[in-house]
Image (spheres, rainbow, N blue to C red):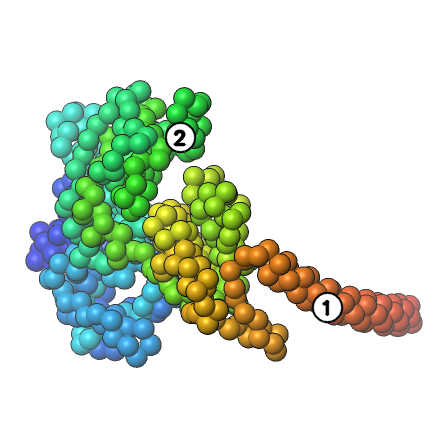
């Protein structure tokens, strides 16, 4: 049954984010498509790991957000948290379970962009609605982006409230390389270009192009270092920006995950990838075994070649640049951790004593292998030789399996040919 936009329940729905910004005509048309659902105590609205992209809103009652038997949070209708969709991350990070009888709304993302036909006169008389429509578009996209999906609802609400709009003309410089970081930017409409000069007087290198709903400017805010690239407007652009303090408290702190080397070693043994984001000259002096050097300045250009299904662990000198790299990766739908404290702290401890937390023991293939700093180079060479021996052994096993499968296939082929001959003989007798 459709929702009456003027009813009490319609008023509640009108307060949901981003429906609160939808023009009246569009909201009324949307209500005609909506169906409010009910659930009894204990019913699961969705399960942890689900990949559906529907948005669930709580209208009456309470729900529990749980991981197995561990209760993470309780959300009650009418609260600030209930204005946002429930556990909006995809795949779902938690189970959502009804506590008592509840009423809820389920929306498909495409329903948020419903646009009934309007005449030219209507559009000219209602410019406010046009602006709100554009606002609804960017807000819907913002809510679906990996960065904002990972934020707690309270943080997300504060971010939306704190965003301010700024406009630039084509050719304007938005950020100059070398200046202090002050804002994080979200492209509402238009196109920008990110460039970098490797050194003073050198030619600019084009790093990336930012289009509608892209974001930029986080590097300097996370690291505290000067801007490492310039950003200019290719077209007239409308940007939404968030100041540094709010970015750090509302986005950086809840988003980035740090990990000790002990925990990192366990993940590496299970197939995670260790990425060193320092400059090549620093990496070549010393680095962790099995790490891959992808300097921060070139990380964005290599995203297309990287595996989004593989867990990534970022390491740098002191953990600061790794945080920037992790933010970039999370924004592009990678799972990333930051090695706590960075490589220098671990390396300094190693030089004082071999009995350090850095030399955690990892059991692999029935034998113990110490994880040590790659100075001298012989340590890493031995690891590579060991890896080669394992691959050679695996190759022999695969060759044996291949031979067995080929023999089995030949036997089956022979058997099928015999059956075909028998079938042919039967047909000839009955024909």
Quadrant location, the C terminus: bottom right
- For the point 54% across and 57% down, which residue is it? 375
- For the point 43% across and 39% down, which residue is it? 297
Q: Which residue is mark 1?
A: 393
Q: Camera-side residue: 76 or 393?
A: 393
Q: Camera-side residue: 368 or 157?
A: 368
Q: Is residue 98 left or right of residue 369?
A: left
Q: Is residue 212 above or below residue 335?
A: above
Q: Is residue 312 left or right of residue 52?
A: right
Q: Quadrant of residue 189?
A: top left
- For the point 32% across and 42% down, which residue is it? 219
Mark 1 burial class by Cα count in 10 Å: few <14, some 14-19, many 20+: few
Q: Is residue 127 above or below residue 170?
A: below
Task: Decide which of tag 1 and tag 2 comes sooner along the chain.
Answer: 2
- For the point 29% across and 47% down, which residue is it? 222
- Callout 1: helix, strand or loop? helix
Q: Where does the image place residue 138, in percent across and percent down from the top left?
A: 26, 40
Quadrant location, the N terminus: bottom left
- Callout 2: helix, strand or loop? strand
Mark 2 burial class by Cα count in 10 Å: few <14, some 14-19, many 20+: many
Q: Camera-side residue: 27 or 132?
A: 132
Q: Quadrant of residue 382?
A: bottom right
Q: Where does the image place residue 155, in percent across and percent down from the top left?
A: 19, 54
Q: Which residue is mark 2?
A: 196
Q: Is residue 375 above or below residue 20?
A: below
Query: Distance from label 1 to label 2 (Cα)?
Result: 47 Å
Q: Where does the image place residue 253, in percent across and percent down from the top left?
A: 25, 55
Q: Is residue 257 left or right of residue 156?
A: right
Q: Where does the image place residue 330, in percent across and percent down from the top left?
A: 37, 51
């Amino acid at each position: 049954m459709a929702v009456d936009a003027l009813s009490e329940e319609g008023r509640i729905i009108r307060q949901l984010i981003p429906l609160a910004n939808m023009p009246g005509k569009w909201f009324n048309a949307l209500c005609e498509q909506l169906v409010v659902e009910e659930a009894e105590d204990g019913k699961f609205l969705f399960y942890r790991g689900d990949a559906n992209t529907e948005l669930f809103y709580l209208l009456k009652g309470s729900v529990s957000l749980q991981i197995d038997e561990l209760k993470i949070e309780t959300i009650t209708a009418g609260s600030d948290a209930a204005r946002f969709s429930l556990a909006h991350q995809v795949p779902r990070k938690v189970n959502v379970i009804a506590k008592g009888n509840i009423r809820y709304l389920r929306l498909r993302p495409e329903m948020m962009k419903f646009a009934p036909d309007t005449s030219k006169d209507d559009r000219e008389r209602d410019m406010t609605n046009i602006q709100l429509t554009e606002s609804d578009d960017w807000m819907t996209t913002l809510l679906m982006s990996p960065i904002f999906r990972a934020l707690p609802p309270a943080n997300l609400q504060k971010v939306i409230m704190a965003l301010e709009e700024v406009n630039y003309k084509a050719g304007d410089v938005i950020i100059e390389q070398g200046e202090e970081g002050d804002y994080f930017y979200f492209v509402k409409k238009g196109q920008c270009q990110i460039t970098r000069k490797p050194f003073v007087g050198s030619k600019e290198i084009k790093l990336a192009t930012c289009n509608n709903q892209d974001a930029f400017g986080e590097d300097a805010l996370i690291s505290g270092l000067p801007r490492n690239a310039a950003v200019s407007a290719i077209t007239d652009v409308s940007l939404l920006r968030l100041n540094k303090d709010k970015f750090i408290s509302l986005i950086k702190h809840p988003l980035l995950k740090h990990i000790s080397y002990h925990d990192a070693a366990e993940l590496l043994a299970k197939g995670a990838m260790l990425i060193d984001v320092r400059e090549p000259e620093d990496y070549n002096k010393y680095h962790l075994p099995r790490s891959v050097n992808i300097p921060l300045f070139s990380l964005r250009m290599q995203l297309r070649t990287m595996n989004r299904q593989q867990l990534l662990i970022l390491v740098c000198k002191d953990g600061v640049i790794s945080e920037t790299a992790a933010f970039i990766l999370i924004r592009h739908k990678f799972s990333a951790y930051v090695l706590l404290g960075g490589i220098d702290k671990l390396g300094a401890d190693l030089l004082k004593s071999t009995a350090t937390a850095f030399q955690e023991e990892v059991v692999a293939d029935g034998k113990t292998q110490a994880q040590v700093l790659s100075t001298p180079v012989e340590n890493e060479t031995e690891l590579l030789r060991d890896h080669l021996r394992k691959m050679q052994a695996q190759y022999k096993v695969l060759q044996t399996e291949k031979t067995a499968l080929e023999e089995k296939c030949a036997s089956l082929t022979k058997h099928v040919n015999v059956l075909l001959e028998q079938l042919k003989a039967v047909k000839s007798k009955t024909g």
